[in-house]
Amino acid sequence: MNDFSNPQVKAKTINSTNVSSNAVSEFIIFGFPSLQGFHVLLFFLLFFIYIFTISGNGLIFILVTLEQRLHTPMYFFVSNLSLLDFTSTTVTIPKMLGKFSMQLDRISFSGCFLQMYLFVSLNAVECYLLSVMAYDRYVAICSPLHYHSIMSRQLYIGLAFCSWILGFASTFTTLILALKLPYCGPNVIHHYYCDHPPILQLACADTSLNVMVGSSISAVVIFFCFSVIGISYVRIIQSILLITTLDGRRKTFSTCASHIVVVNMYFLPLVFMYIRPKPSYSSDIDSLVAMLYTVLTPMLNPIVYSLRNKDIKDSMKKHLWGIRYSSK
């Protein structure tokens, strides 16, 4: 490790940074080291997942936009989640499909960092959005008589807007610090997209500050969002226990069951990937865990919110097959 307290070494490092800043003009996306012989299988698998993901999330977004019955705070947040999943998968999967089908495994220096920033930011947006959705369920269950006065149109649009702004703002420091590092040697990213930990492994300098800042920001975002979700559901459970009938408890809990499933699918692998002291573990393990929240969760979200939701299913019947539903 370099002694950065020595002025001569520091000057040499700065000069090295200036010289080497253009040394790496592109990166090679390697990804799934143990599955390099299954390109065709991976291509068709990811192609099916991508088509299903953009179709499912796109359909939910369109249905919520078209159906007047779905113009409520809860479905507005669901449509934002669908748009988010649509966007996040489009940031990563098309490049993966190009790699597996035509060996297009190279990505420009700027393109790689843009992909990293967009993807990490969209993950942060999803954290904030899931916490906002938990707050919405808390208000709906714990203060049902005041729900529409509390969750006004101005408030729920503002909460969604803040989720997007905070998501992109909170990860900007990570991007700037990563761009300041010199990349002068290896350019093979042992991951299936440009993510923060594998990019840091390629830097020709001490990355301890980057790891610390990246882990700290991720920890703060996840801890804040998970705290909001946890507190909301503690209050929700307390309110449900006060309901005297079993059928009433079941119906009340069912209104937030889909959200609970999505929270668990999303946060558990996210914690493993970003809140840890080392920039990476095994490349195969990193890739497998990342697949859970980058590919599978966006694909499953439309299933969770459509198959368990009567309003969404009725809207699909109306707009896709022309079947009118009862207003009861």
Image: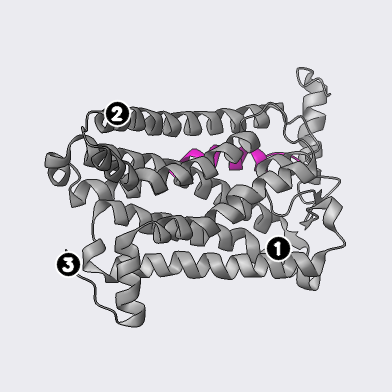
Residue 162 located left or right of residue 283: left
**Residue 169 on the magenta span:** yes
Q: CA distance from mark 3 to mark 2?
A: 31 Å
Q: Which residue is mark 2?
A: 235
Q: Is residue 30 left or right of residue 324?
A: right
**Disc 1, SS:** helix
Q: Are marks 1 and 2 in contact (CB under 8 Å)?
A: no
Residue 318 screen position, x and y as percent: 29, 76
- How much space separates mark 3 and mark 1, taking CA atoms? 45 Å
The residue positioned farthest toward the bottom in the image shown = 322
Q: Is residue 301 magenta?
A: no
Q: Tell me the quarter of the image containing the C terminus.
A: bottom left
Instruction: Name the residue carrying label 1.
Output: 96
The secondary structure type at the circle numbered 2 is helix
Circle 3 residues within 10 Å: few <14, some 14–19, many ≥20? few
Q: Is residue 253 above or below residue 303?
A: above
Of the two numbered discs 3 and 2 on the same chain, state the one appearing first in sequence: 2
Residue 197 - label: none
Residue drawn at 54 percent across, 31 percent down? 217
Q: Dominant secondary structure of the magenta stretch? A: helix
- For badge 3, the amino acid type reads Ser
Bounds of the magenta segment = 166-182
Q: Which residue is mark 3?
A: 327
Question: Residue 168, position in %: x, y?
Answer: 47, 46
**Can residue 129 be seen?**
no
**Which residue is at a point 69% across and 51% down the rendered structure image?**
194
3 vs 2, front mark:
3
